[in-house]
Image (cartoon, grey):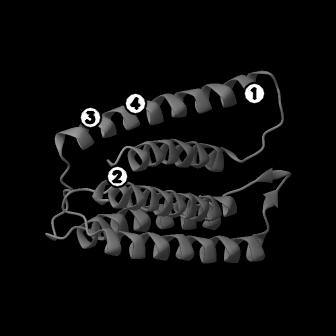
């Protein structure tokens, strides 16, 4: 295994471990499991279904492109990870717009701060990768793009959460009048 690939594997494992502690830190009760009401559970089920079919479509598209001999845009690792990020974004976006993203025991302020921190950290890591090793290797985008894609993912989620929060706030203000 190349040193660069080993770094990606270690980074992925560390990211998974950190995410376990981040979930616990975001929850008001300090538990690992986020609680949702029945409406949120139903909406989250729909979101997972849409994310699943998005990933299936993404994989099918890349299989077709490969079978047709279309030159690759990304290396294999990046191709798979970008597919995961896109499907996670579908799941998160659906949940945000259907009030099923923030759990009942989640501290929204802490959630926002941690999300911004994760986005910034991935942006810094992605830029350092980009400066150190470039964006293209043998004419394809390699794993240096992954951290930038994750950073973009968190920026989009933050923007969506902010817009949704403003819409909900205006609706509640108009109901009070």
Disc 1 secondary structure class: helix
Question: What residue appears at the point 83 percent right and 30 percent down from the top-left corner?
Answer: 70
Q: Counting other residues with Cα less than 10 Å from the Cα at mark 3, is it few (<14), some (14-19), or many (20 or more)?
A: few
Query: x, y (%) of residue 55?
Result: 53, 34
**Quadrant into which the C terminus falls:** bottom left
* Residue receiving disc 1: 65
Disc 4 secondary structure class: helix
Disc 3 secondary structure class: helix
Between the residue at mark 2 and the residue at mark 1, the CA separation in whole angstroms equals 34 Å
* Residue receiving disc 2: 101
Q: Earlier in the sequence, mark 3 or mark 4?
A: 3
* Residue receiving disc 3: 42
Between the residue at mark 2 and the residue at mark 4, the CA separation in whole angstroms equals 15 Å
Between the residue at mark 1 and the residue at mark 3, the CA separation in whole angstroms equals 35 Å
| Relative to 63, 81 lies left or right | left
Mark 4 and mark 2 in contact (Cβ < 8 Å)? no
Between the residue at mark 4 and the residue at mark 1, the CA separation in whole angstroms equals 24 Å
* Residue receiving disc 4: 49
Q: Is residue 41 above or below residue 2?
A: above
Q: Which mark identifies residue 109? A: none
| Relative to 139, 1 lies left or right | left
Of the pair 23 and 59, the residue shown nearer to us: 23
| Relative to 177, 10 lies left or right | right
């Amino acid at each position: 295994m190349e040193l660069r690939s080993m770094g990606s594997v270690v980074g992925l494992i560390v990211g998974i471990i950190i995410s376990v502690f981040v979930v616990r830190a975001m929850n008001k009760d300090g538990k690992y499991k986020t609680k949702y009401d029945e409406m949120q559970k139903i909406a989250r089920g729909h979101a997972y279904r849409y994310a699943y079919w998005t990933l299936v479509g993404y994989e099918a598209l890349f299989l077709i492109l490969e079978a047709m001999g279309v030159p690759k845009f990304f290396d294999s690792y990046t191709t798979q990870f970008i597919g995961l990020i896109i499907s996670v974004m579908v799941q998160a976006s659906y949940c945000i717009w259907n009030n099923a993203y923030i759990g009942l025991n989640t501290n929204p302020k802490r959630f926002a701060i941690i999300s911004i921190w994760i986005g910034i950290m991935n942006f810094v890591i992605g830029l350092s990768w980009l400066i150190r090793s470039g964006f293209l290797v043998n004419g394809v985008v390699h794993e240096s793009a992954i951290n930038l894609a994750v950073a973009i993912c968190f920026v989009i989620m933050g923007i969506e959460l902010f817009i949704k929060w403003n819409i909900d706030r205006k609706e509640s203000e108009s109901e009070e009048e």
